[in-house]
Image (cartoon, rainbow, N blue to C red):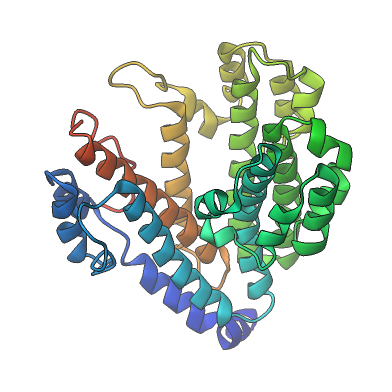
Amino acid sequence: MGDAYFNIDHGYLEGLVRGFKSGILRDADYQNLIECQTLEDLKLSLQSTDYGNFLANEPSPLAVSTIDDKLKEKLVIEFQHLRNHSLPPLSKFLDYITYSYMIDNIVLLVTGTMHQRPLSELLPKCHPLGSFEQMEAIHVASTPSELYNAVLVDTPLAPYFIDCISEQDLDEMNIEIIRNTLYKAYLDDFYNFCKSMGGSTAEVMCNALAFEADRRAFIITINSFDTELTKDDRYKLYPTCGRLYPDGLASLSRADDYDQVRAVAEYYAEYKALFDGAGNNPGEKTLEDKFFEFEVKLMLDAFMRQFQFGVFYAYVKLKEQETRNIVWISECVAQRHRAKIDSYIHIMP
């Protein structure tokens, strides 16, 4: 009976997002893109896909940053359409998706404020999915204290700030530590929200968020080597909603080098496969790319289940990867560096 009720409130939007997914570029489309010699060729090639004439009004010569901005703009238009027509609890779920982009935007604005950068320079760099009404108000703040209060008053991220970060921290903490502290609170909160919904949404989303939490734990650990971050502080940054919690995270917090991180991954079949063969040598895929490939597979699997909200999260993640792919190919074309032009992440066969 729950499935019938799901369709009454959310069936139209689920059908819509599945329609959007069918427009994701396939291998044949990418093959056409990597054969382009100029960005103008790339623009023409994209016209034959679901992107259509989205670059039609852009003057020549095209810049890669323009393509990137337009790709994001198209995703935002689609996402806002879904959000504007959604009913609770889907509307709340879609809001949660935007919080990760808000965290990145706030961290960008905080960094800019600390270094006295003008607002006109910072706002274009913010991700449009993470924009919020009072974003400009944050930049009016000239001190960490004013900034802290502006974030608390004007953004939905207030609970994460209150629980994790004090006014003094904004002035003294490394900006990446602030970002990861907020992400940890956000992921754990989003995980609990999805879990409380039960059913297929909980199964699909808890799986997806557990992977995201574990990926962050691995990356935080690897990036912390040869820095001033202590092992205790590193442990505090790990999200606790992944499969690594608690024993894997405890082992990661004690790791001193990449091989010890790899040894922790050995205990988890899916992560062992990602670390095997990962490297920076010619012919090897980076660990980051392996994570992206695994995420794509996870997101495509989410579309195999019906009557659940995971498809909305999965669609945004797949479009994010598609944007990274197109920007990568565009950069290779623009710089005439074709040796690695096909090093994109395959999404749809």
Q: Is residue 166 visible from the viewing direction of this image? A: no
Say if 108 sits above or below 16 in the image.
above
* In the displayed structure image, the side of residue 163 where residue 95 appears, left or right: left
Please give the name of the residue rendered at 64% of the width and 84% of the height, measured from the top-left corner: 1
Q: Nearer the viewer, residue 76 or 219?
A: 76
Q: Nearer the viewer, residue 304 or 24?
A: 24
* In the displayed structure image, the side of residue 79 where residue 64 appears, left or right: left
Quarter of the image holding residue 6?
bottom right
Q: In the current view of this chain or complex, which residue is farthest to the bottom? A: 8
Q: Is residue 280 visible from the viewing direction of this image? A: yes
Say if 128 sits above or below 173 in the image.
below
Quarter of the image holding residue 95?
bottom right
Percent across and percent down for residue 211 are 59, 42
Percent across and percent down for residue 137 are 72, 60
Could you tell me how many numbered marks the image carries? Answer: 0
Q: Nearer the viewer, residue 339 or 174?
A: 174
* In the displayed structure image, the side of residue 320 where residue 326 appears, left or right: left
Please give the name of the residue rendered at 28% of the width and 49% of the height, measured from the top-left corner: 63
Percent across and percent down for residue 185 are 76, 47
Please give the name of the residue rendered at 64% of the width and 42% of the height, measured from the top-left corner: 112
Say if 9 sits above or below 283 in the image.
below
Percent across and percent down for residue 93 are 65, 67
Please give the name of the residue rendered at 43% of the width and 48% of the height, measured from the top-left corner: 296
